[in-house]
Structure formats: C-alpha cells, structure tokens
Image (tube, coloured by chain):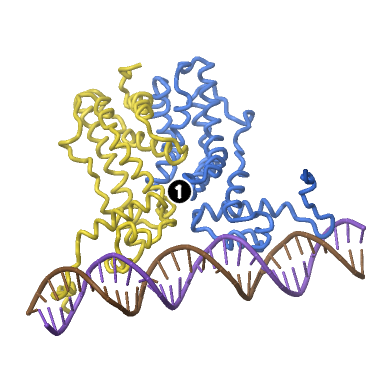
Chain colours: A yellow, B blue, C purple, D brown
Amino acid sequence: MTQIDLVEDRPKLGRKRDPSRDQDILDAALDVLVESGYDGMTVDMVAARAKAGKATLYRRWPSKSALVLDAVACLKAGELDPDTLPDTGTLRGDLVAMIRPPAIRDGERKLRIMSGMVSLLADNPELADAAHAALVEPRAAVNRIFFERAIARGEVAPDIDVEKLILIGPALVSYNVLMLQRPVTREFLISNIDKVILPAAGVRPPPTA
Amino acid sequence: MTQIDLVEDRPKLGRKRDPSRDQDILDAALDVLVESGYDGMTVDMVAARAKAGKATLYRRWPSKSALVLDAVACLKAGELDPDTLPDTGTLRGDLVAMIRPPAIRDGERKLRIMSGMVSLLADNPELADAAHAALVEPRAAVNRIFFERAIARGEVAPDIDVEKLILIGPALVSYNVLMLQRPVTREFLISNIDKVILPAAGVRPPPTA
DNA sequence: CATATACGGTACTATCGAGTTCCGGATATC
DNA sequence: GATATCCGGAACTCGATAGTACCGTATATG
C-alpha cells in the first residue's frame, strides 16, 4: 500500500486560497447560466461577473462543465425548513400561502437554470441528478408535506397518488414558462390550485368560485 | 419607383433546383436537432445526414438559424384531421383513444425538438411562434375538440376552463420527459387522464378503479 | 525579510464551427 | 453542343471560446 492519506497536498506556505471567492464564482456562474444558457455562457463571462481572473476559476474547477455542475449542485433549497413552512389548516391554504413574489421569482430562476441545461441532461446523468436534487425535489418535498398533512387531517383520501399530485403544480408552471413563454402570475397559480390540483386531490368545492 | 416586381431572379437556363432535396434537408435538420440540440448541431451534421453538400444548404437557406426555423415551421401536424380523430362518445374514451405508440413517439420527438431550442425562445420571438404553432398548438387543438364535444354532450359543465384543461396533459408529459427524464408509458398517460384531467374537468368516477 | 502561493488581468494556443469558394460532374435551356 | 445552373464534396477563411502561461501584486509562513 502506498500512502493514500497524505494525497491532499495542502500548501503550508504562501497566501491562502480565499474560500469566499468560491461562492461568488458559483453565484456568477448561475447568473450567466440563467441569462445565456449553458452553451451561450463563456468562462470569461463568469469570471468578469465574479470580478475574478479566469486562472482563479481554473485553479478551483478543472473545466467549465465541472464548474456548472458544482454551481447547480451547491444551489440550496432555501425554503425547506419545516418550521418556516406555512401551516394554515387546509390544503388550499397551505398551497396558496406558498405563493409569494420572492418564491415566484426563485421558481422562475430555477426554471431558467433548468432550461439552460435541458439538452445536456440526456447524456449527462450526473448533471441530471444534481439538477433534479437541487431544482425539482425541494419544491416537490414541500408539496409532499402539505399533502401528507392533509391526509392526516382527513381532508383528502389516504389512497391518493401523492407523488403525482405534487408534480402537477411544477409541471403546469414549467410548461407555462418554457413552452408558452408566459409570465407566472398569482392568478395563474391560484387557478392551478383551484381548477386542477384540488380537484385531482378530491377536495370538493374550491372555496372561492 | 424602381421595378420591384421582377426581383425574383428566376434563372431560365441551367439545371433546375431539385425541390425534393428541401424536405430531405429539413428532415435531417430535425433529426440532428432532436439528437444534439440547437447548439450541439452543426451544419455539417445536417448536410451529412441528408447526403447533401453544405453549399446546397446555403444555396437554400441563408443561415443555420433560418434553416432550423424553417424546419420547425414546416413540421406538419399530421394528426389534426377532424375526420380521422377518434369519437368514442365519452371524453375519457376520446382521450384514451389518442394513446397509441406512434402518437407517443411523435409527441416525444416534438418534445425533444422543443427542448433543443428552449433557451433560444426567450430572445427569438419568431422561433417561439413557429415552435408554438408547430409543436404545441396542434395537440392542444385536438384536446379542444374533445372537450367541446364533451360540453355539447353535457358530459362536462360548459363553464369549465377549456384552455387550461387542454394544457394539463402536455404539461405533465413535458415535465415528465424533460425534467424528470422518465419515459412516457401508456400507464403514465392513462393515470394523467384518470387522476388529473378528468377530475379537473369535473367528470365524477374514473370508470376503471 | 525571504519564500511560496493566491489574486486579478492579459496574452497566448488550439480547436471547432459558421459561412464561402471552388471543383468535376450532372442536367436543364436554347 | 454551347451555356448556365444545379449537385455532392472538399478546402478554405474567420471569429469565438476553452484552457494555459505568465505578469505584477497581495498575503500568508518561517
């Protein structure tokens, strides 16, 4: 056996690598990705946006694709605290309570990140996994909590297909934004809840006609 | 006024342009677009696939983007004959009757064409319009017919939001394929109909439990 | 204060792809 | 059969970009 443990060649001398630059660069990468898509984005754009030298980027990531993968993987959910989640007592109340301008903006941003990579996902399982974990699953998890609460309350039947229901909202929004190129408005989200999600969940009358 | 009408410089001499090559090239362009996405596709790939010279392509279209735009715009619906459409007497029957392997394949192909261009649509309204007309609208039109028949039969209430309901299916399928990277199966489509679309339309019991 | 490394920035190399040009051969008109 | 234009194909130009090398400067250890 060769010495495997000391492989981490940590330099003991010289200036230290500034860890705060990492996040700046990853943020810049996501910004550029949103604006230009994966193919339209250049490493120089990212460096300029982060006010960093290109060499600094390549000192930390071996390639553009590795940088983007890391940027997506490090994208935090930021809305998944079960404590900060609304709990209004009704399924509709919970779903509607999630509609707030910052959440809408965040969702649209994530959608554009996704759209900038869609054509890569097919032949890049790593990226597809990272994208799913960072962009799709967090929102689905929130909905999952709402539905399980509703089941526990007896508000919806326990045999509903939760995994399907939690995807209706994201699917409608993503189709609306990416395919139809329409903005996401509060009215749109409310009508999704009242006209599609709640009927599919078997909740009788949308409280407001 | 200058002579505007004779601008069409039709050559009267020499070999004629073979119109059948047009469709071959457009088909090849769509194939490559599906497999590689807009940015991954090269004009050489398209020429090779169509067994054509690159010069032949540029004799007919001024640029790669014009070629792709034309390829998408010329993509025909091929399923919109109101005569060949199923008419089973129930909304569910009509929707289920549309589930056939060729239609599934066709739908997935259109979806991948769309995904190969998603990031272009935002700053290319022409392309967005062409994509919508060729890829989104034909399928929506079919569903619209089914829902309007159902309303005429009294099967569903006349005040339902048809324009929203006809998009549920496409939205669920596109999310399933593009975001979740899952295949489109017959069971998936059936469950979309029974668990989401029909409840949203207010059709009481999914005939099969 | 000497050494080693990180930093932002610039210049460079190598590759790749859009678009052009030219070729020999095929096919049309006159 | 002369001429003009098409065809598939190959060679070319030119701009853009991933990745590398190096600069002068800043900051850490010893």
Relative height, residue B170 to residue B21 (above, below): above
Which element type, helix, strand or loop, lies under badge 1?
helix
Relative height, residue C23 to residue A151 (above, below): below
Residue B174 location, quadrant: top left
Q: Is residue A71 left or right of residue D6?
A: left
Q: Is residue A70 left or right of residue B15?
A: left
The C terminus of chain B lies in quadrant: top left
Name the residue nearer the viewer: B109 or B203: B109
Name the residue nearer the viewer: B177 or C10: C10
Q: Position of residue A126 (x, y in %)?
A: 33, 57
At 19% across and 64% down in the image, what residue appears?
Answer: A18
Q: Is residue A54 left or right of residue C12?
A: left
Name the residue nearer the viewer: A201 or B51: B51
The N terminus of chain B lies in quadrant: top right
Q: Position of residue B27 (x, y in %)?
A: 61, 51
Q: Position of residue B28 (x, y in %)?
A: 60, 55
Q: Amino acid at mark 1?
A: Ser
At 30% across and 41% down in the image, what residue appears?
Answer: A106
Q: Residues within 10 Å of mark 1 (few under 14, many from 20)?
A: many
Tell how many labels: 1
Q: Position of residue A91 (x, y in %)?
A: 25, 26
Q: Label 1, on which residue? A: B119
